[in-house]
Image: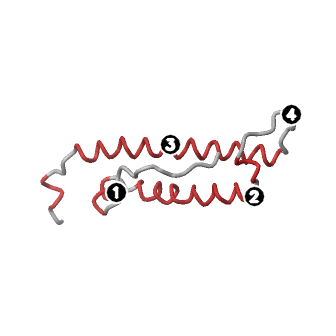
Amino acid sequence: MSRLRHRRIPLAITPDTLGRAPHLAVLDVIDHAVHPATCAILAEFPALMGDPHPWCPEPPEQLAARRLLRQMHTFERALVRYRQTLARLLESSTPSPTDNIDF
């Protein structure tokens, strides 16, 4: 379950980006919180760093923690894919001339 984080953030969080996609601010905070949460779970259950023993069932709390880590990893991958897709959409659309008008 443990792995190195080698991913590249495909979309920089800038004021312009947040103006066009404000939900990215919350997703960025969640993305940063997943790593320390993973480290805390692994510190609590070091056996999760490897595969479960084939003949000894895991305690319920360790099994739940293993499932949680798997779901957190799935969420991280989904977030990276979402940000990559959003980066392409935000780069391809040009701001309209009325975006610079102050009212």
- Name the kind of residue labelled 1 in the image: Ala
Q: What is the CA distance from the residue labelled 4 to the residue labelled 3? A: 31 Å
Per the image, the residue denoted by label 4 is: 55
* Residue 27 x/y as whole percent: 47, 54
Rendered position, 21 above or below 88: below
Position in image of residue 59 (x %, y %): 85, 45
Give the residue at mark 3: 77
Q: Distance of mark 1 from mark 3, alpha carbons?
A: 17 Å
In the picture, measured across the screen, residue 72 lies left or right of residue 95, that is: right
Q: Does residue 98 appear to the left or right of 87 in the view shown?
A: left
Q: Answer yes or no: do the residues labelled 1 and 3 have beta carbons within 8 Å?
A: no
Q: Secondary structure at mark 2?
A: helix
Residue placed under numbered mark 1 in the picture: 12
Q: Residues within 10 Å of mark 2 (few under 14, many from 20)?
A: few
| In this view, 28 is above or below 63 | below
**Mark 4: few/some/many CA within 10 Å (<14, 14-19, 20+):** few
Q: Dot 3: what SS?
A: helix
Does label 1 or label 3 sit earlier along the sequence?
1
> How far separated are the C-alphas under marks 4 and 1?
47 Å
Residue situated in front as seen by the camera: 23 or 47: 47
Among the two numbered marks 4 and 1 on one chain, the one whose residue lies closer to the N terminus: 1
Q: Residue furthest right?
A: 56
Q: Nearer the viewer, residue 92 or 21?
A: 92
Task: Residue 44: give its label.
Answer: 2
Q: Amino acid at mark 2?
A: Glu
Give the number of the mark in front: 4 or 1.
4
